[in-house]
Structures are given as structure tokens and as C-alpha cells.
């Protein structure tokens, strides 16, 4: 049975794939710890999405990775739901054209 975070990840990936101009992946293994659960390119913008269950927060290392993405010109976000991702995309100028 998938854990709640996995269900949220799947829903977010489904949403991102429904938009035009997207590439999305869920890295299974990385050579270093702390990388985001979902990496995607959406209408020319790179997003690293750390998915957490409602009420949970990213670790210090996960926060550092998201900050590295931001400092490199991407968007590092924490999401507890698909709605969180929609809000972040809107803040970053992503149109919800399906």
C-alpha cells in the first residue's frame, strides 16, 4: 500500500503532466541525499518539489537543496497537496493551460 506522501506525489505528477509544455520526473535514487521528490520543467521554469504529508516539514538538508535550486535560478518548493503546487505555479507565472 503506498504511503500518503507517495499518493500526493502521484497526484502532483498527474497534475503537472496535464499542463502544456511540461517535463516531469520522480527520481528514484540519487547519489546524494536530500534532493526533491519531483523535478519538473514547466513552461520554461525548473521546479524542484519536496512533497510532505500535511503537518510535516522538510529536513534541514531538504531545505538546503531547495535553496540551492532557487540560487541557481529554479524554483524550490514544499508541497503538501496539488493545490499547493497550483498556487506556487501561479506565483511563478505558469499558466494553467491544459
Image (cartoon, helix red, strand yellow):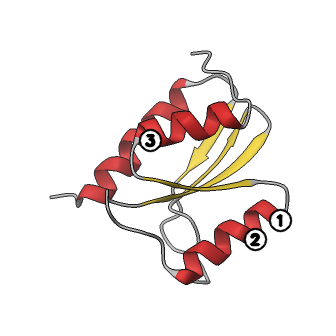
Quarter in which the N terminus is drawn:
bottom left
Classify 10 Å Cα crowding around label 2: few (below 14), some (14-19), many (20 and above): some
Q: Which residue is mark 3?
A: 12
Coordinates of residue 63 in the picture (x, y in percent): 60, 73
Front-most of residues 9 and 70: 70
In terms of image quadrants, where is residue 10? top left
**Residue at 42% across / 39% down in the picture?**
82
Decide if residue 69 is on the left or right side of residue 28: right
Tag in front: 2 or 3: 2
Q: What separation in Å lies between label 3 and label 1 (alpha carbons)?
A: 24 Å
Q: Nearer the viewer, residue 16 or 93?
A: 93
Q: Quadrant of residue 6?
A: bottom left
Using the image, tell me which numbered label, if any, was put on residue 6. Answer: none
Q: Decide: marks 2, 1 in contact (CB < 8 A)? A: yes
State the image coordinates of residue 9 (x, y, percent, origin top left). Answer: 40, 50
Q: Is residue 3 left or right of residue 49?
A: left
Please state the horizontal and vertical placement of residue 83, each as a whole percent of the image. 44, 36
Among numbered discs 3 and 1, the one appearing first in the sequence: 3
Position of residue 66 measured from the top left corner of the image (x, y, whole percent):
66, 66
Please name which of the two marks, 3 or 1, marks the residue nearer to the observer: 1
Q: Quadrant of residue 91?
A: top right
Q: Quadrant of the C terminus?
A: top right
Instruction: Name the residue: 74% across, 63% down.
Output: 69
Comes first in the chain, label 2 or label 3: 3
**Local secondary structure at mark 2:** helix
Q: Could you give the CA–CA distance between mark 2 and mark 1, rounded to whole angstroms?
A: 5 Å
The residue singled out by tag 1 in the image is 71
Q: Vertical placement of 47 versus 53: above or below?
A: above
Which numbered tag is attached to residue 68? 2
Q: Nearer the viewer, residue 80 or 48?
A: 80
Mark 3 touching mark 1, by CB under 8 A? no
Amino acid at each position: 500500500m503506498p504511503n500518503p506522501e507517495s499518493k500526493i506525489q502521484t497526484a502532483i505528477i498527474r497534475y503537472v503532466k496535464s499542463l502544456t509544455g511540461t517535463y516531469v520526473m520522480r527520481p528514484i535514487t540519487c547519489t546524494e541525499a536530500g534532493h526533491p521528490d519531483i523535478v519538473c520543467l514547466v513552461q520554461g521554469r525548473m521546479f524542484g518539489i519536496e512533497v510532505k504529508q500535511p503537518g510535516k516539514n522538510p529536513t534541514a538538508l531538504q531545505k538546503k537543496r531547495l535553496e540551492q535550486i532557487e540560487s541557481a535560478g529554479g524554483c524550490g518548493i514544499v508541497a503538501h497537496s496539488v493545490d499547493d503546487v497550483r498556487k506556487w505555479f501561479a506565483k511563478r507565472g505558469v499558466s494553467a493551460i491544459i
